[in-house]
Amino acid sequence: MEARSRSLNFFLLSCVFLFVCTEVLLSPFYPQFFKKVYGITDPDLTGFYIMTCRLTVVICTPIWGLIANKRQNSSTLLIIGQWGTGFSCFLMAISQSFEMFVAASILLLIFKSSYFLLYTILMQENRKTETRAAASYHAVLQGAIVAATLLSGWVIQMGNPLQVFWLIGIMECLLGLFSYFMLKDAGRNVVDGQLQESAHRSTTTMLPQLFLFGFVVLTLYLAVNMVRPFFTTYTEQMYHTDTMTSSILYLLPSLMAIVSLPLIRKYSEKLGVKGYIAATVMIITGLFFQGVETGIAGLIVFRCMFGIGAAWCLAKLDVFLFKWSRNTHGDYSKVSAVQNVGLLLAPVAASTIVNVQSISEIFFYASLFVVLHLIVFLWRTFTSERNRGKLHLHKEEKHALYK
């Protein structure tokens, strides 16, 4: 049984790696890609493409979550998503115009929006070790980003970059085939205690809590992603770095997420909310002082602090959701949509700050978002503990009455 669990975890994390790697593969070079393939040089069209992709994911992810709540076995939906993604990749590979490429991309993201089920199935299969599973997921995610960034330079130099979608489509279809055998019994096991605990939660109680949690997620993802679009430009202007040095500095938080995995898996559960608060303070400190000229050594230190804190918070935040959630697929699909809203708004907010003030101010405003995140998180934690205490008291009174 334990061997099967390890094999299933490895397979799910492999699917996550491919999903993230292929999703961000061309993102650093979209302007160069569209110029090389379709002769497009208008930056507004690139912005339109990215905005369209994000909106598609924001809209479709909750729909997949709603469908998953109606089904007993969510792995079937994931397999459909994988095969649909593979078919869409084949359409992208033969796209002769920018319009056809956009249409194929939308179709791909409609199917690929189901991939959040990988995470919910992973967490359901690791109910007793949720923190370890969440930390592993985020480490694999960051590793995929690093791998995709390194591969993107090779892809853009291909004679016809569209050919890479043939390879991606084949891999997606193969994973869909393997998923049929690997995930037959996955996603069915729901802990009885969780169902009993969630039974008393009314919809009117859950909605405000879900709204607060969504705001917590939005502020964190907005802050973490705000600093990315102009980071290399910032280091080149402030520290006169070359392209290679700027790229390494850019990837430091992702590398720190991978390096800090053993630390998160060992201490995150033990420290709980206190550890989360400490990690949030690390993010605030790391973000704020990245915007202050401290020399390359100081920038590296604060960049690493930011990376470790972000990895800790992102992993633990998911654990809080899965422990609190009444219906895993539905709630996480909504949270996943909120994450994509954060990814959508982050470059817009960064561009506005740069146009109105300066690049270094991005770090200051990002740190303020994390301060707001911490305030709302502490408020939500306080109200949840208070409600749990009232419920416990009500159960004791009811028990004493019948006794």
Image (cartoon, rainbow, N blue to C red):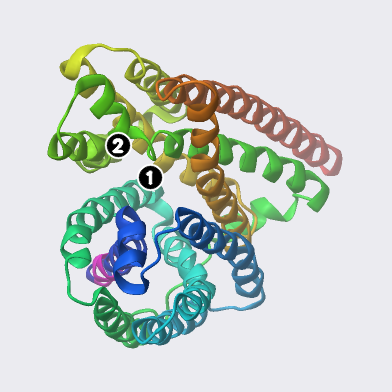
Main SS category, magenta section: helix
Q: Which of 137 and 243 is in front in this view?
A: 243
Q: Which residue is drawn at 68% across and 37% down?
A: 212
Part of the protein shown in magenta: 4-11
Quarter of the image for the N terminus: give it.
Answer: bottom left
Decide if residue 184 is in sight here: no
Q: Mark 2 points at which residue?
A: 264
Q: How far apart are marks 2 and 1 (CA)?
A: 8 Å
Q: Does the magenta stretch include residue 239?
A: no
| Three-letter code, disc 1 | Thr
Judged from the image, the secondary structure of the residue bearing numbered disc 1 is helix
Q: Name the residue under label 1.
A: 131
Measuring from the top left, give residue 51's x and y in whole percent.
54, 57
Q: Which residue is drawn at 22% across and 43% down?
A: 258
Give the left or right position of residue 79, taking residue 264 as reference. right
Measuring from the top left, give residue 119's x and y in whole percent.
43, 61
74 vs 157: above or below:
below
Q: Within 10 angstroms of label 1, few (less than 14), some, or many (20 or more) residues?
A: many
Judged from the image, the secondary structure of the residue bearing numbered disc 2 is helix
